[in-house]
Amino acid sequence: MASPLNAPKYLRNSRIGRIGVILTGIVLGMPMVMEAEKRALLVPNGSFESPATDFVNIRVDGWLKTARPADYPEGGGFLWDQLSGVFRNTPPGSPDHISNMDGKQALYLFAIPGVGLIKDATSTDSPDSSANSNFPHRFEIGSRYTLRVGVIGQGGGMLPGVPIDIDLYWRDELGKIHSVSTTRVTNSQALYPNRQQFVDAVVVTPLVQTTDPWAGRPMGIRFLSQVEDAERGGYWDLDNIRLEQELPDLEAPRMTLRVDPTAQSWTITWPGRRGESYDLMESSDLLAWSPVVVGLTANDTSIEHTLPIGNSGHNFMRVFVRRP
């Protein structure tokens, strides 16, 4: 079976969705194996490069800070708005330089109860910022979502066992946040032996079902400190947010082959779907592939293509399914 990464360049650049298994010219009814398409989704300011700073900035463009709890003493120590922000990496060779930071900046977030950041289609920090584009993604039925975030603990004398939650969430009609999937990251020396290397935390949702209350709802990302008051103190660093959608697998259709000896031709047929197009490729050795026809479009039920019967003893075919 071919891999999208091994496909010809012009097909790789066409965002191949799924690939049918190779069909030999003498096999009838061979099923197509359908592979899930994985798509990277844009997270505006997901690397915390905006606003640019030479040291620290308490603004975080495109993100909304969680509301200050009523019992937080705004008058003493740090103001609530100062408990999260962006900071610039130190120069290479510095003892506190972070070696795998994405870009030049990252996020700091204090280990204080309730400190956090959120991003969804409606929650933004700086409406006048060019980095503050909406976050339009929704929980599409049949899809699975994976969120990866680089995290460093141990900042500022943070105690072992201090937790932070990383969520993918949705909002109900009243605007209340509900988590779909949460990963709790717990501070420890074993997980963060030094502060020079981000370690990925991963959040994975289940497949979105039609009966899920979040099906079709706008998606949100949240970082939320869950430390108990008695253990408050220190800070987290976060960076390089990556969000991936795994599109639904379709039921594997069956490819069929019909030979017409009189016309010296054969016709390959497979189920088609409106809105998709198909590329038919051929090979004599399963190594080198060449296009037979590209951009075939489907009617409501099926698609087919007729070819003359060649002189070679074996002919291998494969079908690439594209998405518009």
Image (spheres, grey):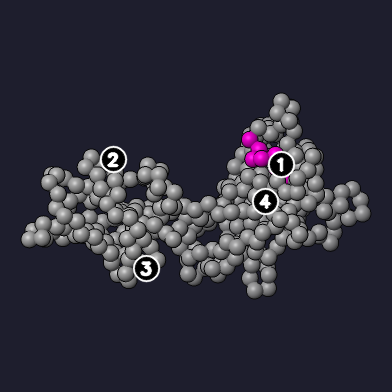
Lower sequence index among marks 1 and 2? 1
Q: Amino acid at mark 2?
A: Ala
Crowding near pointer 1: few (<14 within 10 Å), some, many (20+)?
A: many
Residue on which disc 1 sits: 105
Q: Mark 3 against mark 4, which lies toward the viewer?
A: 3
For numbered disc 2, what is the local secondary structure?
A: loop
Query: Whole-percent x and y of residue 291?
Result: 30, 49
Q: Report if the CB atoms under discs 1 and 2 are less than 8 Å apart.
A: no
Residue on which disc 2 sits: 288
- Residue at x-position 51% and y-position 55%: 245
Crowding near pointer 2: few (<14 within 10 Å), some, many (20+)?
A: few
Lower sequence index among marks 1 and 4? 4
For numbered disc 3, what is the local secondary structure?
A: loop
Lower sequence index among marks 2 and 3? 3
Quote the CA–CA distance across marks 2 and 4.
Answer: 42 Å
309, 268: nearer the viewer: 309
Residue on which disc 3 sits: 274
